[in-house]
Amino acid sequence: EIVLTQSPGTLSLSPGERATLSCRASQSVSSNYLAWYQQKPGQAPRLLIFGTSSRATGIPDRFSASGSGTDFTLTISRLEPEDFALYYCQQYGNSPMYTFGQGTRLEIK
Amino acid sequence: QFQLKESGPGLVKPSGTLSLTCAVSGGSISSGNWWSWVRQPPGKGLEWIGEIQHSGSTNYNPSLKSRVTISVDKSKNQFSLTLTSVTAADTAVYYCAHNGRWCLEYWGQGSLVAVSS
């Protein structure tokens, strides 16, 4: 099973700043198989990014992502108030099919 | 765009069986994609439970495989989750989701299930 480790656990930034979230895999992950989600309190996760760098429908272009092999990054170029939330990376594998990182909390400084 | 909605009892007794249904709208469950269940214990992260295709083919998380069954009812455009021998550790918000390209594209709102006597 591939384990995903996200860092930092909590990121404290101000609106307008740039956020960089990391996701490291215990084994190499195909670039097709890495996704990112945003979750706000009391809500279901929302798909942000699939295939390492493709934005899901309706996701603003201040969200971007990149990476390969074992190291992946989600970047939010200029933080808006609504961006403060929990973020999870996810990989698709063999068994279990989907595994998630433990999450990064993005909080207002 | 699919809409999904979970339903089922919010309270299950220890050693009992948890049963949830996910109603799909906005498209046919027989569209050829896979459909998943994911859970999230209070204050914790996400755990994928398993998936089903309209044909009835399934894949399960090995950590839950002995207790999980996912089934599909094409006539009602819904799929279901059954988890047996539950304990307090199974208390969680349970989400159903539509699988996209190696990701979970659309999610239901979630259903909180507590295991308690």
Image (tube, coloured by chain):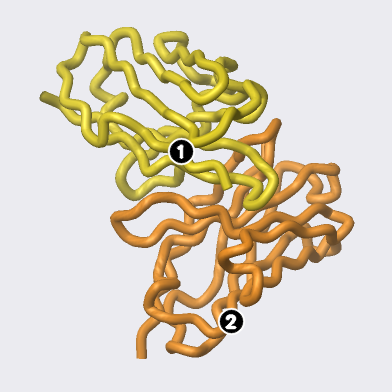
Chain colours: A yellow, B orange
Residue A57 appears in the picture as rendered = no
Residue at the spot 58% in from the left edge and 68% down from the top edge: B64
- Residue B65: in sight, yes or no? yes
- In the drawing, does residue B42 fall left or right of residue A100? left
The residue carrying mark 1 is A4
Whole-percent x and y of residue A3? Answer: 49, 42
Q: Is residue A9 left or right of residue B30?
A: left
Judge by depth and name the residue closer to the eye, A21 or B54. A21
* Residue A35 image point, x, y percent: 55, 29
Quarter occupied by residue B68: bottom right
Element class at badge 1: strand
Residue B63 falls left or right of residue A39:
right
Q: Which amino acid, by three-letter code, is at mark 2?
A: Thr
Circle 1 chain: A
Residue topped by disc 2: B84
Q: Give the residue type at disc 1.
A: Leu
- Residue furthest out toward the right: B55
> In this view of the protein, which residue sits in the foreground, A41 or A22?
A22
The answer to which quarter of the image holds residue A99 is top right
Q: Secondary structure at mark 2?
A: loop
Give residue A12's position: percent from left, percent from top: 16, 25
Q: Are dots 2 and 1 on a single chain? A: no
For the residues marked 2 and 1, what is the alpha-carbon distance in whole angstroms? 28 Å
Q: Is residue B33 above or below residue B76?
A: above
Say which chain tag 2 marks.
B
Dividing the picture into quadrants, the one containing residue A21 is top left
Q: Are marks 2 and 1 in contact (CB under 8 Å)?
A: no
Q: Residues within 10 Å of mark 2 (few under 14, many from 20)?
A: some
